[in-house]
């Protein structure tokens, strides 16, 4: 059994507001629990190791871990009771126990319901309408929507290709980001869009650790027969386990910011509505630099506000407006310090090769929003 892409975006400035997630309330061993619906997880149920004492979970030494998942999970729990609204109860639920990862990561949930635990249900998601429905018998007017078959995988993968030419695409509702392309597709897409300015985002994946990736805005991007509007595009991490069918692209929740989504597991179909006329431009890193947790060392994108303010690769972030990065970020409602509105000014205190310096930066909407 493989574990799919399970990444947490990092704000790059300390503690931050919770990511956009599909949450549902439940109970584990009679105790209230925050659960996340994550179609990119290949286990029916999973929980971080740190949550085990809270719910009285114990490891089942008799269950072995597949080598392909050893970098992500430590093992499996003994059976426990789980209750999900409105009327689901299981007395013999088994959780995959996730590695906690670095102390800098806050999982911001108690447990995950993975694709195998969701596959017989329906999930309707619309960010614009503020709708998240999970269950059965969801009735929608889907005239004009695109429909794609769900492939037989342990994570949610649909076929965006034509007849005889399958094109597997992963929907990862546990990730709040946009579109990630396989290294091959990313290289081809960037060759066609090489002149476009990029920002940066960093994230943690249990399988591959911390990574920093370029992120480019696309007014429209086609992946086979599927079209997405006003999205941020980046390269998928190499060598990331991604289910029993490796996808050519992965879609986070932000990929559907301008599209409604209906996942119909029972009928084995994914339905995607055309883009809303009132298009939403997704939030992004308006600084154009990211700071690696632990060391707080900077990586700076060329052509960004950070570069214009003379931030450089290797600078170490000490303070934001005189506050420790975590203290500054804890006062915000945005997911990231750098996703605050354009025009927000911050004064950064940095260490550059042993010398303390300050730089004033104004966050800007600097990504090119024209063209494809």
Image: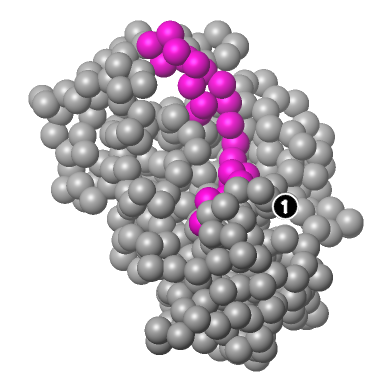
Q: Mark 1 packing: few (<14 Cα in 10 Å), some, or many (20+)? A: many
Work out whether residue 30 or residue 38 is closer to the camera in this orientation and state it. 30
Residue at 23%, 29% (x, y): give it: 76
Count of numbered tags: 1
Residue 24 covered by magenta stretch: yes
Residue linked to disc 1? 257
Is residue 190 shown to the viewer in this render?
Answer: no
Residue at 58%, 26% (x, y): give it: 24
Residue 201, quarter of picture: bottom right
Work out whether residue 326 or residue 232 is closer to the camera in this orientation and state it. 326
Q: Is residue 227 above or below residue 60?
A: below
Colour scheme in the image?
one colour
Secondary structure beneath dot 1 equals loop
Q: Is residue 294 above or below residue 148?
A: below
Q: Horizontally, is 207 left or right of 58 in the view? A: right
Q: Is residue 208 above or below residue 314?
A: above
Task: Estimate the x, y position of residue 126 in percent, counting from the top left.
Answer: 74, 41
Q: Horizontally, is 331 left or right of 83 in the view? A: right
Task: Estimate the x, y position of residue 82 in percent, counting from the top left.
Answer: 41, 14
Residue 199, quarter of picture: bottom right
Work out whether residue 322 or residue 147 is closer to the camera in this orientation and state it. 322
- Locate the C terminus by quadrant: bottom right
Task: Estimate the x, y position of residue 319 in percent, counting from the top left.
Answer: 55, 66
Q: Which span of residues is magenta-colored? A: 14-35
Q: Is residue 139 above or below residue 335?
A: above
Residue 128 covered by magenta stretch: no
Residue at 30%, 16% (x, y): give it: 56
């Amino acid at each position: 059994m493989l574990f799919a892409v399970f990444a947490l975006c990092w704000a790059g400035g300390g503690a931050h507001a919770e990511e956009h997630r599909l949450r549902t309330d439940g109970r584990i061993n009679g105790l209230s629990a925050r659960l996340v619906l994550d179609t990119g997880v290949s286990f029916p149920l999973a929980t971080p190791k740190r949550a085990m004492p809270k719910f009285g979970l114990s490891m089942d030494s008799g269950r072995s871990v597949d080598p392909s998942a050893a970098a992500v999970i430590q093992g499996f729990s003994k059976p426990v009771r789980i209750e999900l609204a409105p009327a689901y109860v299981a007395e013999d639920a088994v959780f995959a126990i996730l590695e906690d990862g670095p102390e800098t990561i806050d999982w911001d949930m108690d447990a995950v319901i993975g694709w195998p635990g969701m596959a017989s249900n329906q999930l309707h998601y619309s960010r614009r309408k503020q709708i998240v429905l999970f269950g059965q018998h969801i009735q929608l007017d889907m005239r004009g929507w695109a429909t794609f078959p769900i492939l037989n995988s342990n994570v949610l993968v649909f076929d965006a290709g034509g007849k005889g030419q399958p094109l597997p695409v992963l929907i990862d509702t546990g990730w709040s980001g946009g579109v990630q392309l396989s290294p091959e597709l990313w290289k081809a897409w960037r060759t066609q869009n090489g002149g476009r300015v990029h920002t940066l985002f960093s994230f943690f994946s249990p399988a591959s650790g911390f990574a920093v990736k370029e992120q480019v805005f696309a007014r429209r991007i086609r992946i086979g027969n599927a079209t997405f509007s006003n999205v941020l595009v980046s390269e998928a991490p190499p060598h990331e386990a991604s289910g029993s069918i490796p996808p050519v692209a992965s879609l986070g929740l932000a990929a559907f910011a301008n599209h409604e989504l209906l996942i119909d597991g029972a009928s084995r179909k994914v339905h995607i509505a055309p883009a809303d006329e009132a298009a939403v431009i997704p939030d992004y890193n308006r600084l154009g630099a990211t700071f690696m947790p632990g060391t707080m060392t900077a990586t700076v994108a060329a052509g960004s506000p950070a570069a214009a303010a003379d931030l450089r690769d290797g600078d170490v972030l000490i303070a934001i407006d005189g506050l420790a990065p975590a203290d500054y970020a804890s006062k915000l409602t945005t997911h990231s310090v750098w996703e605050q509105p354009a025009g927000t000014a911050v004064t950064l205190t940095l260490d550059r090769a042993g010398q303390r310096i300050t730089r004033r930066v104004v966050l800007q909407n600097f990504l090119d929003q024209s063209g494809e």
